[in-house]
Image (cartoon, rainbow, N blue to C red):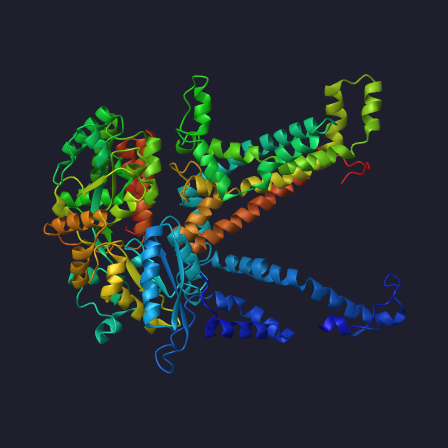
């Protein structure tokens, strides 16, 4: 795995030798500098990569969340970049989604954020509004970052306060994944896009009764299910700087699922709790503890790796036009990076190079670049990738307008929903009590008066 | 290095000659320098990893620092973080309650288990060394993540523990996934790791002179009387030591709660230990200034509890030399 000793490694060693000859005064000076070094975004505005020596060895750090499959694809694509630009190597770090943003925040606080990092709309506003991300507008305008093949609404979903904070990397939408094999074994009908919520719950109840496996994960703690449901009633999660829903809406949402639980359509609260995490490998549809799970369409292939059963995917219940083309994630550049130009070039390569596009496939969602999306859909062989492309393309024709990028405090709005929903699931609060507490917590989180 | 060029130190440093007091550059002085040089790895560690970050966090606790903004742009907010903790933030008092419950139950039980097993293992029988090792084993795994994961899998609905209960026809709860039992499951994990205090108790028991027991039995004291009137008083300094240490440990419990709840303190905040709440506020919700304030209040609280423990020690801790301390 270790690369041959590169010139940069040699340079590093010599530097280490130099530190050994610290005098006492320099030692004290270094100590005094510790607090300064803790300062994030320390004045790294100069860029030593662009100008003088194009062959100077550069190591870029890159950080993403995902499973092993994604790691393999990303590493291959980055290796291709290194092949074309031998002076650029990568320090790759990846981990599961759970805990990813804790780590990213810690690195950022230490002034040691990766040059390139993956981020999603749950945190983009947090990072962009605090100027952690590099504004990519000038790169887009100069063509160094080519977004001309992106759907307009998709790249604009990376704009926060007029600044291009991230490059939308993949498009996806909500997907209800169900266990095909389980249904086939018991001769049960598959759920279909366009079922009403009531019809869906009745279907799940029937699955529970016939198969003895709970029909569906209870999504009442899932913000994206709540979001779709709200939009189907002309509401939204956010409206300008405020919440787009009322206490009554949340009460109704919790009551809908309380009814489903009472009818046996869902698992018991402790099992629901197990499924209320973002780890793909713990989703109930792959652990065999429920017939369906509420995920994103692009997660299909990765889910499939965790189960032997065949899976299917449809839209969430209700009117599918409430769903939208969401930027599944973004790649952003750290504003304090020493190699901004190169970092942007790497993102440009990953997003627009046909070969890289082929390698990455639909792992992060449908490719943002429409040419590549077309090429990938024609050549993709993985049946689950194929299925996710097919479903997303079908739904694409009915997509409604995208909602606004979530507000600062969104992650708290999400975690409070889990808490409130679980209070109801465990029977410790009534839907109305939990809804009242939830509204108060959300308002505090986004600073709404 | 500079040390090697130092002249040989005086042969009798305990009896310094008049030359040594003459001030700068004397051998005594140089010896001090050498001492500091040898200490420097530790001193640098203390400064760099403990003292400076701590002072920084004290400063940050009076600001609105959010981890992402540069330190030079933070705003001074006075005591707002501290006020918020005590007046506005329900999760704060909830975490305090959870932590107190945890410490008040788990620490005494853990010490009782440690003492009980130490008494059993403080005899000569075949294989006693093996048993001591086996009982110590769980503690070697300490606050490890792997152990917490094992715990989660043992104590969920289809876990090993419920399979065991099923043998007796008992249907167990989903323990770790049940807000009623999640904290108790954590307590059980803490109690099970009683090895460290047990080893210290064992060492303490070995120190008690056998003559005392002999004298007591001659006087007709039974096993219980011997335990109450010989073992406990003689062991009280060790009990005290373990109590202070384990109390501090108990309040700081983090790893197991973090792993068990996926870093959320769930289900529904039932395992929201103080340190976990602090972590969530700082790293997940990016309120690093507030989290710093939480940390300082925590530090003061633990210091107060320790002082209180020390002041009660006067009434029940007996030192062998008979001196009251």
Q: Is residue B34 left or right of residue A352?
A: right
Q: Is residue A159 visible?
A: no
| Quadrant the N terminus of chain A occupies | bottom left
Which residue is situated farthest in the left direction here? A397
Q: Quadrant of residue A247?
A: top left
Number of marks drawn: 0
Give residue B306's position: percent from left, percent from top: 62, 42
Vertically, is A191 above or below A152? above
Vertically, is A175 above or below B214? below
Give residue A110's position: percent from left, percent from top: 46, 62
Give residue A361's position: percent from left, percent from top: 24, 56
- Pick whichever, B66 or A171, lies toward us: A171
Q: Is residue B292 left or right of residue A132?
A: right
Give residue A262's position: percent from left, percent from top: 25, 26
Q: Is residue A270 left or right of residue B272?
A: left
Q: Quadrant of residue B92?
A: top left
Going 39% across and 36% down the picture, which residue do you hit? B267
Vertically, is A83 above or below B272? below
Going 62% across and 29% down the picture, which residue do you hit? B112
- Pick whichever, B266 or B24, lies toward us: B266
């Amino acid at each position: 795995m270790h690369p041959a000793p590169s010139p940069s490694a040699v340079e590093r060693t010599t530097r280490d030798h130099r530190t050994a000859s610290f005098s006492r005064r320099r030692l004290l000076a270094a100590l005094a500098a510790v607090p300064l070094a803790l300062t994030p975004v320390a004045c790294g505005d100069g860029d030593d990569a662009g100008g003088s020596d194009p062959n100077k060895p550069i190591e870029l750090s890159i950080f993403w969340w995902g499973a092993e499959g994604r790691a393999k694809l990303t590493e291959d694509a980055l290796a291709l970049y290194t092949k074309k630009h031998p002076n650029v190597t990568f320090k790759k770090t990846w981990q599961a989604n759970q805990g990813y943003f804790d780590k990213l925040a810690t690195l950022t606080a230490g002034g040691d954020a990766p040059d390139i990092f993956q981020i999603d709309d749950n945190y983009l506003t947090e990072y962009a509004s605090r100027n952690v991300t590099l504004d990519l507008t000038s790169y887009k305008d100069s063509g160094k970052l080519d977004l001309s093949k992106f759907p307009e609404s998709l790249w604009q979903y990376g704009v926060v306060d007029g600044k291009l904070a991230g490059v939308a990397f993949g498009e996806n939408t909500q997907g209800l994944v169900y266990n095909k094999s389980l249904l086939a074994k018991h001769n049960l009908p598959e759920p279909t896009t366009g079922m009403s919520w009531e019809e869906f719950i009745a279907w799940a109840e029937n699955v529970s009764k016939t198969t003895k496996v709970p029909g569906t994960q209870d999504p009442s703690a899932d913000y994206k299910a709540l979001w779709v449901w709200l939009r189907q009633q002309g509401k939204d999660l956010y409206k300008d700087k405020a919440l787009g829903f009322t206490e009554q809406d949340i009460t109704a949402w919790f009551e809908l699922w309380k009814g489903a639980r009472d009818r046996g359509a869902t698992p018991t609260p402790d099992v629901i709790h197990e499924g209320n995490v973002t780890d793909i490998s713990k989703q109930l549809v792959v652990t065999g503890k429920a017939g369906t799970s509420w995920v994103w369409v692009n997660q299909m292939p990765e889910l499939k790796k965790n189960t032997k059963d065949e899976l299917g995917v449809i839209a969430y219940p209700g009117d599918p036009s409430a769903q939208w083309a969401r930027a599944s994630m973004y790649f952003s550049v750290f504003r304090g990076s020493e190699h901004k130009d190169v970092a942007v070039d790497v993102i440009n390569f990953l997003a627009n190079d046909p070969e890289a596009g082929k390698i990455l496939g639909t792992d992060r969602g449908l490719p943002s670049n429409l040419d590549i999306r077309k090429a990938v859909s024609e050549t993709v062989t993985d049946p689950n990738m194929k299925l996710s492309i097919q479903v997303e393309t079908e739904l694409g024709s009915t997509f409604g307008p995208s909602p606004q990028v979530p507000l600062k405090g969104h992650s708290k709005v999400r975690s409070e929903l889990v808490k409130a929903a679980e209070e109801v699931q465990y029977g410790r609060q009534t839907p109305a009590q939990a809804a009242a507490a939830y509204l108060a917590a959300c308002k505090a989180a986004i600073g709404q008066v | 290095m500079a040390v090697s060029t130092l002249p040989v130190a005086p042969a009798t440093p305990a009896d310094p000659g008049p030359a040594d007091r003459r001030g700068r550059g004397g051998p005594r002085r140089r010896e001090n320098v050498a001492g500091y040089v040898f200490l420097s790895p530790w001193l640098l560690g203390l400064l760099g990893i403990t003292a400076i970050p701590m002072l920084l966090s004290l400063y940050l606790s009076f600001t609105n620092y959010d981890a992402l903004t540069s330190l030079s742009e933070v705003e001074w907010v006075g005591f707002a973080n501290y006020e918020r903790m005590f007046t506005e933030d329900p999760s704060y008092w909830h975490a305090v309650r959870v932590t107190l419950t945890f410490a008040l139950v788990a620490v005494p039980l853990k010490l009782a288990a440690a003492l009980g097993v130490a008494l059993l293992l403080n005899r000569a029988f075949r294989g006693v060394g093996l048993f001591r090792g086996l009982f110590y084993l769980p503690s070697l795994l300490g606050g490890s993540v792997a152990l917490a994961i094992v715990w989660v899998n043992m104590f969920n609905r289809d876990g090993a523990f419920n399979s065991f209960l099923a043998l007796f026809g008992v249907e167990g709860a989903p323990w770790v996934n049940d807000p009623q039992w999640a904290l108790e499951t954590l307590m059980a994990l803490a109690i099970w790791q009683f090895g460290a205090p047990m080893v210290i108790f064992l060492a303490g028991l070995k120190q008690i002179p056998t003559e005392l027991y002999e004298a007591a039995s001659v006087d007709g004291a039974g096993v219980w009387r011997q335990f109450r009137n010989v073992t406990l008083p003689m062991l009280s300094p060790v009990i005290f030591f373990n109590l202070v240490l384990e109390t501090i440990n108990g309040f700081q419990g983090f790893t197991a709660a973090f792993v068990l709840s996926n870093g959320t303190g769930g289900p529904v905040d039932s395992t929201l230990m103080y340190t976990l709440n602090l972590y969530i506020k700082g790293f997940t919700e990016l309120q690093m200034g507030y989290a710093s304030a939480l940390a300082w209040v925590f530090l003061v609280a633990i210091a107060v509890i320790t002082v209180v423990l020390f002041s009660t020690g006067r009434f029940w801790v007996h030192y062998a030399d008979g001196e009251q301390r």
